[in-house]
Amino acid sequence: MIELKHLRTLTSLRDTGSLTATATALHLTQSALSHQIKDLESRLGGQLFLRKTRPVRFTSEGEILLRLAEELLPRLAKAENELASLKEDVNGRLHMAIECHSCFQWLMPALKEYQITWPSVTLDFSSGFGFEPLPALMSGELDLVITSDIQPRSEVHFEPLFDFEMRLITAINHPLASKTTIQPQDIADQTMISYPVQKQRLDVVKHFLQPAGVEPA
């Protein structure tokens, strides 16, 4: 009696708030949509929503079907995705490198979710002192690179993921702790502790110290 198209119609009507917008979203004529709703109401013996209200106000019968749709449609979509994955036999190995050390806080949970969705795909990380990921990407050795080092290369596509703020951390009694703004010259004679990579690959060196002609101590 109740079909999936009816549930999709009601959720769309709730989301759009009008019959006209729902008809457009479902690629139906407004008369076809009205006929579908009246047919379902005739089968159920009651109205599903109050006419001429904006936004649409659902009756008790309509609310029951909406709750059913909210429970059933996501489960159906999940099952369809799982079946599609089985059909496509999605597996293999994803070769990647990470040059952005500040990424790890959000990247690890994201990779965990990825492996839950694609359990048959193995994640393979390439790293090491002196390892150059972009040439490896261009040669096909890597599938993707997460980096803060954007280079103008026509053969490589860079997709922005997020912005981050660099901060200088000092002891509370350090002379620089009282400054609200730090200039490159302020840390010219300071010992800087950072990630164990070549200094030319550090953002603080490339974008802060080098443009001012300052070399880290």
Image: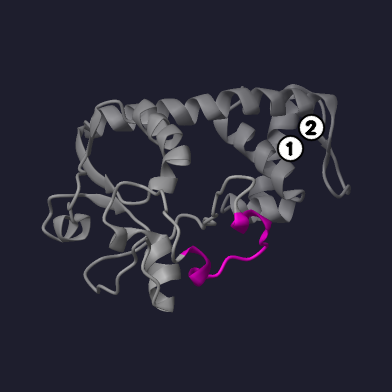
In this orientation, which residue lies closer to the viewer: 92 or 82? 92
In this orientation, which residue lies closer to the viewer: 198 or 3? 198
Height in image: 151 above or below 176? below
Which sits earlier in the primary sequence, circle 1 or circle 2? Answer: 1
Residue underneath mark 1: 38
Q: Does the magenta stretch include residue 160?
A: no
Q: What residue type is labelled 1?
A: Lys
Displayed quadrant of residue 217: bottom left
Displayed quadrant of residue 24: bottom right
Height in image: 58 above or below 191? above
- Whether residue 197 sits left or right of residue 62 in the image: it is left
In this orientation, which residue lies closer to the viewer: 78 or 149? 149
Residue 194: x and y in percent read: 39, 49
Q: How crowded is mark 2: few (under 14 residues within 10 Å), some or many (20 or more)?
A: many
- Whether residue 1 sits left or right of residue 190 in the image: it is right
Residue 54: x and y in percent read: 86, 50
Point out the stretch of residues depicted in magenta. 175-187
Residue underneath mark 2: 48
- Rendered residue at 49%/27% (across/down): 76
- Rendered residue at 82%/31% (across/down): 47
> Circle 2 sits in a helix, a strand or a loop, which is it?
loop
Residue 193: x and y in percent read: 41, 48
Q: Does the magenta stretch include residue 178?
A: yes
Marks counted in the figure total: 2
Residue 40: x and y in percent read: 69, 31
Q: Which of marks 1 and 2 is in front?
A: 2
Majority secondary structure in the magenta region: helix
Disc 1/disc 2 C-alpha distance (Å): 9 Å
Q: Residue 202 carries which label?
A: none
Residue sitting at the far bottom: 212
